[in-house]
Image (cartoon, rainbow, N blue to C red):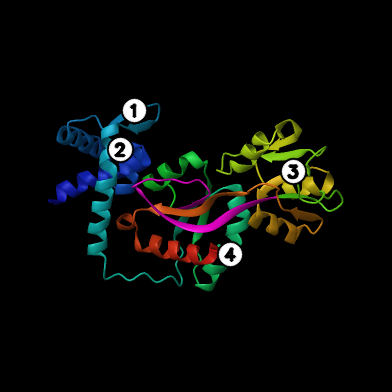
């Protein structure tokens, strides 16, 4: 493969990830006309438009989406071979890392991750991206995030997945308004606080629906951050993962955990990255660190 071929493929991968001719030109340190010329050559080479302009974005065609994974991995392997003598040293690393988390993940996983980074002597700029469950795969494939942790089960050949922990759901309420002994009628005459399922936690809504409790929902919110303060001030009940409830009761001793009268298991929390061949040495190190920090 010639240098010109490599440059064309780098332009294609960058355009797929950034969706902007201007951004690609800045990243590759070339002019915008050079990027446009290379795109014309790529279109001729693959017999497809590859990218269509929609507003300010260059949106990939189905052909481009099909090409991206193999071409990205091929370039990653070439770069890894060229740079294999450059051993990555975590101590002192100050680059930028992007981590995809739900609001619930921020509260439970960020503290141990930051502790592990400090232990390694690394001070990266860790940016947390709030992703809906349906955006995780695209964010990882495009490279807008390096790693994601979610309860959503994503079965994709484009991604690497590792189980982090099981998820058992429980009920949480104020100690001033405790629930009765666990049983099928324990929620009679009680009202619920419901949190949006866009982060992938669909079990509470499904459970409330299946057991006819949806009419008892008195408050719906988008984020978990408000849950503890609202529960302490009211007699509301919320259904949420046990590991999150344990974090809340640690910081808010006025809250109490109750077992559910029905099976409360959902899909496990998993960690996702690009496929192994497409990872940089920094991403491999970051993945190992995060897995060690957040596993049960």
Residue 77, image x, y percentages: 25, 58
For the view shown, which residue lies furthest in the front direction? Answer: 184
Please tell me which residue is depicted at 53% across the width and 52% down the height of the picture.
Answer: 268
Residue 219 placement: quadrant: top right
Q: Of circles 2 and 1, which is in front?
A: 2
The magenta segment is 147-170
Q: CA distance from mark 4 to mark 3?
A: 37 Å
Q: Which residue is mark 4?
A: 112
Residue 189 counted in the magenta span:
no
Q: Secondary structure at mark 2?
A: helix
Q: Are dots 4 and 1 in contact, CB under 8 Å?
A: no
Residue 153, image x, y percentages: 47, 46
Q: Which residue is mark 1?
A: 53
Q: Are dots 4 and 2 in contact, CB under 8 Å?
A: no
Residue 110 placement: quadrant: bottom right
Q: Secondary structure at mark 3?
A: loop
Q: CA distance from mark 4 to mark 1?
A: 42 Å
Q: Which mark is residue 184?
A: 3
Q: Of circles 4 and 3, which is in front?
A: 3
Disc on the earlier residue, 2 or 3 = 2
Q: CA distance from mark 1 to mark 3?
A: 56 Å
């Amino acid at each position: 493969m010639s240098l010109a071929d490599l440059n064309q493929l780098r332009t294609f991968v960058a355009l797929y990830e950034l969706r902007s001719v201007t951004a690609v030109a800045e990243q590759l340190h070339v002019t915008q006309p050079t990027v446009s010329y290379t795109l014309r050559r790529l279109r001729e080479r693959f017999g497809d438009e590859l990218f269509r302009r929609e507003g300010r974005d260059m949106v990939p065609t189905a052909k481009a989406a099909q090409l991206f994974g193999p071409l990205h991995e091929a370039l990653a392997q070439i770069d890894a071979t060229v740079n294999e003598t450059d051993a990555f040293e975590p101590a002192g690393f100050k680059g930028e890392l992007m981590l995809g988390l739900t609001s619930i993940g921020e509260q439970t996983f960020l503290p141990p991750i930051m502790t592990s980074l400090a232990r390694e002597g690394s001070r990266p700029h860790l940016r947390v991206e709030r992703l809906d469950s349906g955006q995780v795969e695209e964010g990882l494939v495009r490279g807008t995030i390096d790693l994601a942790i979610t309860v959503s089960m994503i079965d994709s050949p484009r991604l690497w997945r590792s189980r982090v922990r099981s998820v058992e759901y429980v009920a949480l309420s104020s100690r001033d308004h405790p629930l009765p002994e666990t049983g099928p009628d324990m929620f009679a005459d009680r009202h619920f606080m419901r949190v949006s399922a866009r982060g992938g936690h669909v079990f509470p809504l499904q459970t409330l629906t299946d057991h006819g409790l949806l009419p008892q929902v008195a408050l719906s919110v988008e984020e978990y951050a408000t849950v503890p303060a609202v529960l302490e001030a009211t007699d509301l009940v919320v259904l949420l993962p046990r590991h999150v409830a344990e974090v809340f009761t640690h910081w808010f001793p006025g809250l109490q955990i109750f077992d559910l009268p029905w099976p409360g298991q959902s899909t496990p929390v998993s960690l996702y990255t690009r496929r192994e061949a497409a990872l940089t040495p920094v991403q491999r190190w970051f993945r190992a660190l995060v897995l060690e920090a957040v596993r049960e």
